[in-house]
Amino acid sequence: MAAGHAEIAGAGFAGLVAAIALADRGWTVRVHERTPFLRAEGFALTIHSNGVKVLKALGVFEPAVAGAMRISRLETRNARNETTLTLTPASALYRISRQHLIATLAEAAERRGVEVLVDSPVVSAKPDGQLVLENGQACKADLVIGAEGVNSRVRDTIGVRVRRIFLQAGGACRMVIPRSDAEKTLEPEDEAVNHEYWSGTRRIIANPCSRDDLYLALSCRDADASGKRTPLDVPSWREAFPHLAAVIERVGRETDWERVLWARFTIIQLSRWSAGRVAIVGDAAHSMPPDLGQGGGTAMMNALALAVALAESADVESGLSLWEHRERPLTEHTQRVARIYNHSTLWPERVRTGVFKLIGRTAFLREQVQRTSNHTPRGYQNEGGGYVSRSHA
Ligand SMILES: Cc1cc2nc3c(=O)[nH]c(=O)nc-3n(C[C@H](O)[C@H](O)[C@H](O)COP(=O)(O)OP(=O)(O)OC[C@H]3O[C@@H](n4cnc5c(N)ncnc54)[C@H](O)[C@@H]3O)c2cc1C
């Protein structure tokens, strides 16, 4: 179809990638962000090889990973600090500052003429192609995208059925503290191992996200009142992870607690990903627990794939059906595997250790876990080992 005009709600990973990919295909695009400046909650995220390919397809890979840590191996450990599972990805992953990634995507969008409006909250949308702002203005468009994350207003006003599941296996709080000299000496280059430590129903992910910063995510069951407490209940976490006592004490001392939020793990499933001219992308359509580190990667893949499907179709409605038909099976697989992994929080330690060891030994199970990471997103064209995007060929 001929390119038209798109109005997008939400300048997160999904909204900005959709904006860039559409602009690359000739669309005029305007993005509305509710907050007064572009910001990302949660400090850092891991971008797996599928997300890396999206960044390459958009021509923003090098600036996006500037200062990020390369992750060469993923390791889980049990309460006795024994390794229970080691996964070696086919190609490198990156732990990136969220703020840096958002800024890189926003800059790339603006370079392509995308208008990004901050302080512009959206309240609803209409399937005939209208995005309604909090100030009452109705913005007409050939395509409207709801990409405002898990509490999307666009999604909730276009008549698609929403299934929202809050997981008993909990939520997480995230923080960044300075890396100690000893940590920098242990992993001196911009390359690190992703460590995930388990103890009973609690878990700590502790990884550098830059030369100077250590990113942590502490997660536990929703019913674990002392585990969820912020500022951190240091003695209770130290008791669960005696081998991590030193870092837990630093978290208690060095975290800026005003910036720390408890994020509850939620699954969102929709009866359809679109209605008329309105598409729902990213967490708004398929939020998942973060156990595979694929919420952001899947959001970016689906945003790019949306622009590709529209370019291949006769009109917006058929483009949106083609897009959902192609992308939904992998997204549902990712949600399913992330949910099972997340549920293992509630399993007895012995059972979880046994299952993780089995995954390590069984190619079929490893493929289930790594399928999304190893996927080549639509819109990424690997020609002779290189990558090509429309405006960066
Ligand atoms: C603990 C934890 C760890 C995670 N780790 C990873 C990881 O390692 N790797 C990974 O890929 N994913 C990870 N995720 C998931 C990832 O954070 C999300 O999947 C991703 O942020 C989804 O991007 P999005 O653009 O769809 O939504 P969001 O990032 O939520 O962005 C939505 C944007 O819309 C804006 N907005 C909201 N309402 C409105 C409105 N009414 N009007 C206008 N704008 C609005 C928001 O301010 C925001 O800017 C993790 C999640 C959690 C909770």
Image (cartoon, rainbow, N blue to C red):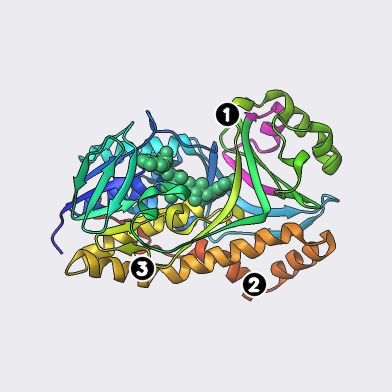
User: Which residue is pictured at 35% across the width and 54% down the height?
Assistant: 157
- Between residue 163 and residue 69, name the one nearer to us: 163
User: Which residue is pictured at 69% across the width and 32% down the height?
Assistant: 230
Q: Which residue is mark 3?
A: 324
Q: Which image quadrant for residue 115? A: top left
Kind of residue indicated by mark 1: Arg
Task: Determine whether 379 is above or below 247 in the image.
Answer: below
- How far apart are the alpha carbons under marks 3 and 2? 26 Å
Asked if residue 74 can be seen in this view, the reply is yes
Say left or right for 75 vs 333: right
Q: Residues within 10 Å of mark 3 (few under 14, many from 20)?
A: many
Say left or right for 198 vs 323: right
Mark 3 near ligand 1 (CB under 8 Å)? no
Q: Secondary structure at mark 3?
A: helix
Q: Residues within 10 Å of mark 2 (few under 14, many from 20)?
A: some
Q: Secondary structure at mark 1?
A: helix
Residue 390 in the image, given as x and y percentages of width and height: 23, 55
Residue 167 in the image, given as x and y percentages of width and height: 64, 56
Q: Which region of the structure is painted magenta?
A: 177-196
Asked if residue 11 can be seen in this view, the reply is no
- Between residue 329 and residue 374, name the one nearer to us: 329
Q: In the rendered view of the protein, which quadrant contains the N terminus? A: bottom left
- In primary-sequence order, the first of circles 1 and 3 is 1
Label for residue 259? 1
Kind of residue indicated by mark 2: Leu
User: Which residue is pictured at 33% across the width and 54% down the height?
Assistant: 57
Q: Residues within 10 Å of mark 1 (few under 14, many from 20)?
A: few
- How far apart are the alpha carbons under marks 1 and 3? 36 Å
Q: Which image quadrant for residue 292? A: bottom right
3 and 2 marks in contact (CB < 8 Å): no
